[in-house]
Image: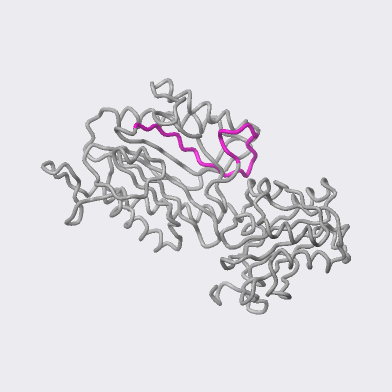
Amino acid sequence: MSAESTDDETGVDPDALDTDYGPLAAELDARDAVGFVAVGDRFDDDLRWLTRFSGPDRAYAFVAVASDAATDDTGGPHTALCAPALFDDQARREFPGDEVRVDRQGDPAGVRAAATLAAHGVDGGTVLVPQGIPHDAAVYLERAGYDVASAEAVARARETKTDAELDRLRRVQRAAIRGMARAEEILAASTVDAERDELRWNGGVLSTERLRRQVNEVLAAHGVRDAGNTVVGAGPTAADLHYTGTDVIRPGETVLLDISPRGPDGYYGDVTRTFAVDPEGGWERRAYVAVKAAREAALEEVAAGVPASAVHEEAAAELAAHGFRVDSSEVGFTHSTGHGVGVSLHEGPSLGGDDELRAGHVVTIEPGVYDPEVGGVRLEDLIVVTDDGFAFLGEYPFSLVPRERE
């Protein structure tokens, strides 16, 4: 964190993300629970959202004490981060809650969480935990006299994004779009080697790996990490939903790019486009027209109060009308129309589920069709649901044939 981005007197980043613990407080009250405990490391997205702490790859704990259970009765859940050793200052800068605990840093995180509950006068009762809490942490809580019960409150709370979270998502989506522009620029500038049936660029064969590296350089230059999520497939490998291998790019075949970087605050972008250099106008063009129409049909259905599954059904119906299968796991439309995006690349809500969309949900719209013998076409955008529709978090133009854009 640079000195320019902090408050001179407090050292606190004025642009730092907050976390609304209201949904957690409501769950504690509804379940008559005395507290909530999450234990994990920097790879635990629930913990990242709860604490805003980008800590190390060793376990630490978040503790929320119900207001009627805490001795100091704060009027809301009293929240604490049990900071790992050597990360005290960073935890104080990043954690938006009430207390950073630096005691007993040599003890397991579950032991420290139990000690934090006890320090606030909670000596028994039900403690809520995420479903994925480490087994040893649950055992330590039970040994300390607490009844452990799982809760989905955090996953649900993460689904609805605040204005500050939307700002983060827009920032990283802008970087993803710049990466897409670089990929299209390279494809547009490539030449066809008819004798070898391959594309060439900048003096060499153009492969999916060369294209991926160019995209990832742009992402890094704009302050985000590719996080191993830059998918580039060509021809048959474009039908592999998450292809990150190396394949020669050939004229006429589809080139599918799915770019999903992660920003410094942990939020993801997600954008997909499909191109073809010198296409023949067969399967690839028919698939592109169908997927683009399915995308438009899905977007027309999006609004707060609409069942998420209705968006998927509209996309599937449009693809079926264009003659593509929607009931297969290998050929045609083989996945949901979209998913939530936040501090996880895939989180709730799923557009294949029955939950209603709510204002503030951030989801992808990404219909696609695939044929493992020919290729794949997918078009994906990131949107936020509003009361009467949606708004894009970033936009990129469409063209099956790549263009040099200004």
> Is residue 361 within the magenta segment?
yes
Report x, y in % for residue 289.
36, 29
Residue sitting nearer the eye, 281 or 77: 77
Taking the image as shown, residue 80 lies to the left or right of residue 392, namely right
Q: Is residue 279 left or right of residue 244?
A: left
Q: Is residue 254 above or below residue 31?
A: above
User: Is 284 a magenta residue?
Assistant: no
Residue 37: name its quadrant: bottom right
* Coordinates of residue 83 in the picture (x, y in percent): 67, 70
When the figure is inspected, residue 32 is found, relative to residue 74, above or below; the finding is: above
Q: Is residue 293 left or right of residue 153?
A: left
How far from the left and from the top, in percent, is residue 243? 37, 46
Q: Is residue 251 above or below residue 60?
A: above
Residue at left 22%, top 49%? 189
Farthest-out residue, left? 195
Q: Which is nearer the eye, 196 or 360?
A: 196
The percent position of residue 156, horizontal first and vertical second, equals 67, 45
Count of numbered marks: 0
Q: Quadrant of the N terminus?
A: bottom right
Magenta residues span 349-371
Quadrant in the rendering for residue 49: bottom right
Res 68 → quadrant: bottom right
Front-lying residue, 363 or 30: 30
